[in-house]
Structures are given as C-alpha cells and as structure tokens.
Amino acid sequence: MTTVSHGFSEYDETTQYLEQFMPARKPSAGFTLIELMTVILLLTILISIAVPAFENIIRNHRLQAAAAEFQALLQAARADAVTKRVPIKVSQEDDSITWKATQSNATVRTITLPDSVMATPGISNITFQTDGSATAANVIFSSTGTPVTYTVSVSPPGFIKAEKTTNE
C-alpha cells in the first residue's frame, strides 16, 4: 500500500466501498429542470425585446407599401390619360382610406389603404391631362406610432415621386 505525504492511503476504505457497491454515474442525456427554466427565461427576455421592434418594422412596411401603391395608382392614371387621350382624375373618397382614378365619372382603378395608414392630401383631386401634365399635389402618408412619413409628390409636368421623411 502506498501512502502520500498527508498520511492517507491512496484508496481509503470509504472510497473502496463506494466504488464496489455504487456504479459510476453516467452523464445524462437530457436536461435538468433548472437548465430548461434558464433557457425559457432567456428566450422570454429576448422575445420581450424583439416584439416591439418587430411591430415597428411591420408598421413601417405597411406605410411604405401604401405609399408605393398610391404612387403606382398615379403612374397608371397618367399612363391611361396619355394612351386613351382622356383626362383621368384621382380623388380621395369620403371614407379617407379609398382612392380612385376616374375617367368621365367611370372608375378605372381603386386602392384602399390599411386602417393604420392615414393619407393627408394637399388638394382633393389630381387630374392628369392627355399630354401627361397634372395638377401639382403632395399627399403625405403617416401611421400612428412611427416617426416615418412618406410624401408622394406630383409636379405640373406629371412627374411622380415618393420620398421618405423621418420626423424625430
């Protein structure tokens, strides 16, 4: 029997007894309850941080999509006025979320904005003439809870552009 400097044998009786009657512990293949609860807590914290940011992204996307759809309506109205050789009028309906393009009181195209998007027109009608010229106008698209706005502008020669503005 070998002894070490502190006076105990390499294997004392207790250690020998435990090794003889108790098998060595095998590593577990699963998770402990504490590990599982820690992971759930961390995921909850991450989700609580990510959800408000994700909602803001969705709100901004809806706003951008509404402005792009309105810009497409104006471009189509201008193209119709030039190709059909008749004036096309784009106006906002009484419900303030529907815009329509009309030709001689017949609706050519219609778009409806999402409930969360508001459009503030500078004038009530935008008319495209047969040569492509138009009534100058600015329509501002905004949404509650976001500092971003989009302005869709129509110039007298009929050029249409959309610009993003951040009001922070």
Image: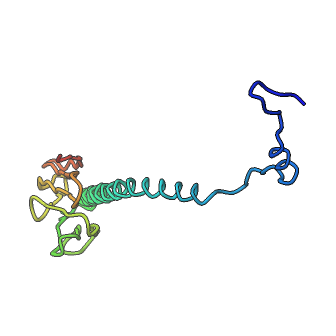
Residue 91, position in %: x, y?
17, 67
Q: Front-most of 108 and 61?
A: 61
Check the image and name the residue furthest to the top.
5
Residue 25, position in %: x, y?
78, 51
Apparent side of residue 24 relative to residue 55 in the rendered image (left or right): right
Residue 87, position in %: x, y?
18, 63
Residue at screen point 43% across, 53% down? 46
User: What colour scheme was applied to this rendering of the protein?
Assistant: rainbow
Residue at screen point 15% across, 48% down? 155
Asked if 153 appears above or below 125 in the picture, the reply is: above
Check the image and name the residue furthest to the right.
1
Residue at screen point 31% across, 56% down? 56
Asked if 152 appears above or below 123 in the picture, the reply is: above
Residue 18, position in %: x, y?
82, 50
Apparent side of residue 81 relative to residue 127 in the rendered image (left or right): right
Q: Is residue 82 visible?
A: no
Apparent side of residue 67 relative to residue 17 in the rendered image (left or right): left
Residue at screen point 16% across, 52% down? 133
Q: Front-most of 82 and 113?
A: 113
Q: Quadrant of residue 9?
A: top right
